Image (cartoon, coloured by chain):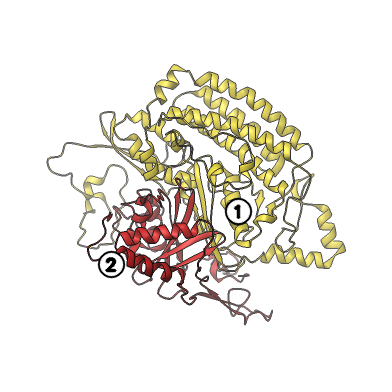
Amino acid sequence: MNDQPEAGGPPPDETEAATGSAVAGATSAPEVVAVRQGAFGVSGSGDTSGFGGLVERVETPPSATRPFGGWFDEATDELELALADRGLPATEAVERIVIEHGEITYHVRREHLLQFAAALRNEPALRFEWCSGVSGVHYPQFSGKELHAVYHFTSITHGRSIRVEVSCPDDDPHIPSIVSLYPTNDWHERETYDFFGIVFDGHPALTRIMMPDDWVGHPQRKDYALNGVAVEYKGATVPPPDERRGYN
Amino acid sequence: MTDSQVRFDPGDDPDAAYTVAGGDWQTVLPAPEGEKQRVVVNMGPQHPSTHGVLRLVLEMEGETVTEARAGIGYLHTGIEKNLEYRSWVQGVTFVTRMDYLSPFFNETAYCLGVEKLLGITAEIPERATTIRVMMMELNRISSHLVALATGGLELGALTAMIFGFRERELILDLFEMITGLRMNNAYIRPGGLAQDLPDGADKQIGDTVKELRRRFKDTSDLLVDNAIWLARTQGIGYLDLESCMALGISGPVLRSTGLPYDIRKSEPYCGYETYEFDVATQTTCDMYGRFLIRLEEMQQSLNIVEQCLDRLRPGPVMVADKKIAWPSQLAIGADGMGNSLDHIRKIMGESMEALIHHFKLVTEGFRVPPGQVFTKVESPRGELGVHIVSMGGTRPYRVHYRDPSFTNLQAVPAMCEGGMVSDVIAAVAGIDPVMGGVDR
């Protein structure tokens, strides 16, 4: 792990001043996560309700602005300092900060995840010694950020919990593995690879864990083909769940 | 394809997968030159003492385990994927089947997350929360009793097994009386509970608590100073604090290293901060310490159940918001549990609006605003976390369970390598994995 500040990094005082304002005020425009249509999920199924024309855009939640409230400000300050010590401006590593339901989410660029996680774990003021693993989410309509890896960290020392979200595009599904820092993520990353096809670079043995070794495809992806059920009655079939008419 | 035809040739097709059954690896991969013969023992997946369909691959030297690997996935049922095609309320009936020995924890963690997304956490009635806590603590006892019983069985202590299952039966009787089912209860629902406690339940729970206190003494008298039990458990499955933190091991295994980490204390939910109880710890880092912790936690859970009984006040068990609260009331009829006849009479005979409302909420369900949450509860096996993502629809977009059994099983190599094969059984029993939760 890289604990030492890099030689090429900017001086800490400059970085601190720059990042303090930049991350806090980062109000990037909301991006479209998904577009939901109609009331029944499936079009062309004889929807006579009149709701079939509904179009609803689901956007990313707004970026949080200072003051965040509670310990979020203090923790974010410490995080910016810790990243600056490692020669990494916080604005470069953290895309945006979102606070929802009393939970703080740091959207981290994948190329900086390892350094970010090292700061979380090693910095005494942060000390997020506990990782609750990684959970994948597939947003097929979130262009360029289809696959998300969501990590939850807890600091038992300070009694804090945060979420770190990293995204990667479908056509380049690579995210660095943090197993070297958090060995507990070994099986969690294998599970996320198995179900979503996210390749965690640097994982010691990234193999399938739930599905059989020779399984084709990654079942939790939204575009994974589901099976219908054949019914022995006049050749009928029950369509796969994602093609059935239902409320969405 | 016969064995002789299988050849390992990675240059041929990088995606090739080989499935080899039994001891046929030599047909695929020749034994390395100059290495002495290795004995690899496949324990499980169908083995009575691997706690369900867990496969342990053990490399042996005599009776000493030199390398241990756990293979899982044999009980994968795709519950997380299934949830994405069910309404938010139906989700409860799926998650309850994950870790089948702690259904109320799975349900509570899920419901707390859905309620957080809905923004109704503060509106959950007091009585519902108290009953949730009570059911979870009773469940903690029944789960620890299975850990004790199967652990005893695996080490040959059959009396411990009989005692454990006998006492668990008392708690399952309570579950059956309250929820109608012994397992897979689907009793805790987003917004509250499926139904209120039946008449006389508090007295029956109180009686059971007294009876359990008496019987737990039998169990501890039998095992705590038992020379054979000590010989089989002390110093077995050693895992220190550092390894626990690195491997993310929670629950009794973590507390056996002396760290009093319990989410009920560190990040209280369901009002746990208002209950009086102690976090049991030991400093032995071994199987015996975990056993003592489970005994103590059962006592503490009985204390919490009694406190719950004291503070139960009449009141609703579901949020007042009729757009979320499941409309039907369940009732026990002559043919078992079903919809309350009063409710059926009302919607079928008296109020068309009530019928429409019932129909819409049951078939369509409610919508949950877009967003994501992570909720954690302290299950009998440790940190049970749920990551829920909503897209604003009537169904979850993604639900992920961070099951403690799954994470804790990663400790098998650290606990078992260098030990005897018979101690592998003890170490796994100390982790107490439930494969339904591991594989989901």
Q: In terms of depth relative to the viewer, which is nearer, B365 or A99?
A: A99
Q: Nearer the viewer, mark 2 or mark 1?
A: 2
Q: Is residue A203 left or right of residue B289?
A: left
Q: Residues within 10 Å of mark 1 (few under 14, many from 20)?
A: many
Q: Quadrant of the N terminus of chain A?
A: bottom left
Q: Nearer the viewer, residue B36 or B91?
A: B91
**Residue B303's image quarter?**
top right
Across and down, in percent, residue A220 comes to 46, 62
Q: Residues within 10 Å of mark 2 (few under 14, many from 20)?
A: some
Q: Is residue A60 left or right of residue B9?
A: right
Q: Which mark is residue B20?
A: none
| Secondary-structure class at tag 2 | loop
Q: Colour of chain A?
A: red
Examine the rendered structure and indicate whether residue B112 appears above or below residue A53.
above
Q: Which residue is mark 1?
A: B112
Q: List the single residue furthest toward the right.
A: B350
| Residue found 62% across the figure and 23% down from its top | B215
Please indicate, yes or no, whether residue A120 appears anywhere in the rendered image. Answer: yes
- Chain ID for label 1? B
**Kind of residue at disc 2:** Pro
How many callouts does the rendering have?
A: 2
Residue B4 location (% of width, % of height): 22, 50
Secondary structure, mark 1, is: helix
Q: Residue furthest front?
A: A13
Which residue is label 2 attached to? A10
Please, is residue A116 above or below residue B432 in the view?
A: below
> Mark 2 near mark 1, Cβ–Cβ under 8 Å?
no
Q: Residue at x 67, y 30 (%)?
A: B209
The amino acid marked with disc number 1 is Leu
Chain letter corresponding to the colour yellow: B
Subunit of mark 2? A
Location of the C terminus of chain A by quadrant is bottom right
